[in-house]
Image (cartoon, rainbow, N blue to C red):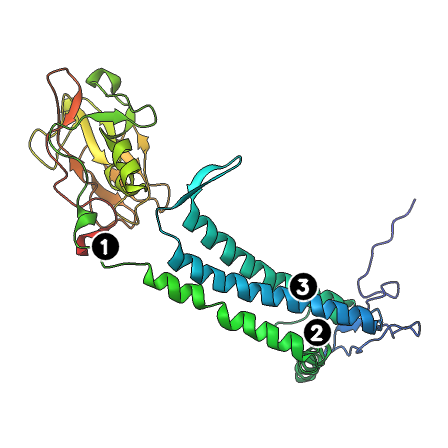
Amino acid sequence: MSKTKFDPYGEDNPANPKKPASSSGSTSSGAAQTHGGSYEEEIIAVEAPQEIDAKAAKRAERQVATMFMVSVVCTLGFVVAYFALPATATIELPLIGITNASNLSLGLALGLSTLLIGLGAIQWARKLMPHVEVIQQRHLLKPPDSLRKAALAQFSQGAADSGLGQRRLLRRTLLASLLVFPLPLIVLARGCGPAPKGELNETMWTGGLRFLADITYQPLKPSDVPIGGVVSAVPEGLLEVQKAQHNLNERAKSAVILIRMRPDQIRSQQGEGWDYQGILAFSKICTHVGCPIALYEQRTHHLLCPCHQSTFDLADDGKVIYGPAARRLPQLPITVDAEGYLVAREGFQEPVGPSFWERS
């Protein structure tokens, strides 16, 4: 059984630019081959546009206009919810549980506003604009002048086919929905609040505060950190702070990692004797853009940030050896309490997190 190779420019291809358009209702813009191998006019209509029923068009017009007006209402509802609902208000929903009422209202209002503008545009295109199937062959990046003129003509024809100039109801409701759409951005700018005044430089770590294993929140002893191991930890009392503040801001600043190596492998620290029997505590927040990091290479004692590959040498005071981070990883001095649990000797001596926080 022989196979015939399909030639996109052959006579059997209905989209062949060199093949004249058939007389069965299809239309073609024609195509003339240039010396460079491109085609001056390559867009070929293979289906004649169909007439739009007047009653169906009127019904679709009302549907689209309704979507645009409901979008306006949702956008205004966003503004009202922003000022009317307290930031700490909560609501209990089935399957979800207790959630923030303000965030839920703002998200639904802005999401529906955006969705309805998009659905209205889709319905407009599907029901009120002529449907013509076209095929466009590949061409050189720089089209000839005749093709540019054809593209401009097609754009003008598309603008006319959209009915934007004739359908005043659609035009007005679309403009109304787009005019009020930026309002949430203006309102949200107000919610940025005052500039930070140093609170980003401070964490809840203080002298005597125990290290708790992240997730289990059990206090850690030196035996819980094996040589070559890495343990993610948080300060004692973090859960209570999160509950009181209704956010995770303190976790984003106070998360640390504990790693252990032989004491003779430690080349330098950020303070004299800040380790405990080879156990070192460093901030878990990358000093580049604040990603949490815990990719530890035991053989080299390097800690790698997965976001932008900043690499820190934990055996040499956490200094940066590769990547875009501008500062070393802050170290937390540690010891043990009377019961043998790992505790902080004092708080961080350097700001944690991205370098721009130092300017807060």
Residue 150, image x, y percentages: 71, 81
Q: Residue at x 18, y 56 (%)?
A: 359
Structural distance between the alpha carbons of marks 1 and 2: 53 Å
Determine whether, in the image, residue 83 is placed left or right of residue 279.
right
As drawn, the label of residue 122 is 3
User: Is residue 44 something one can see in this rendering?
Assistant: yes
Labels 1 and 3: the sequence-earlier one: 3
User: Which residue matches tag 1?
Assistant: 356
Q: Establish if 157 lies above or below 72.
A: below
User: Is residue 49 something one can see in this rendering?
Assistant: no
Helix, strand, or loop for circle 1? helix
Q: Residue at x 24, y 28 (%)?
A: 258
Residue 36, image x, y percentages: 68, 76
Say what amino acid the circle numbered 1 marks.
Phe
Q: Of the residues tagged 1 and 2, which is closer to the observer?
A: 1
- In front: 64, or 85? 85
User: Which residue matches tag 2?
Assistant: 38
**Quadrant (top left/top right/bottom left/bottom right) for the N terminus:** top right
Say what amino acid the circle numbered 3 marks.
Ile
Labels 3 and 2: the sequence-earlier one: 2
Helix, strand, or loop for circle 2? loop
Structural distance between the alpha carbons of marks 3 and 2: 33 Å
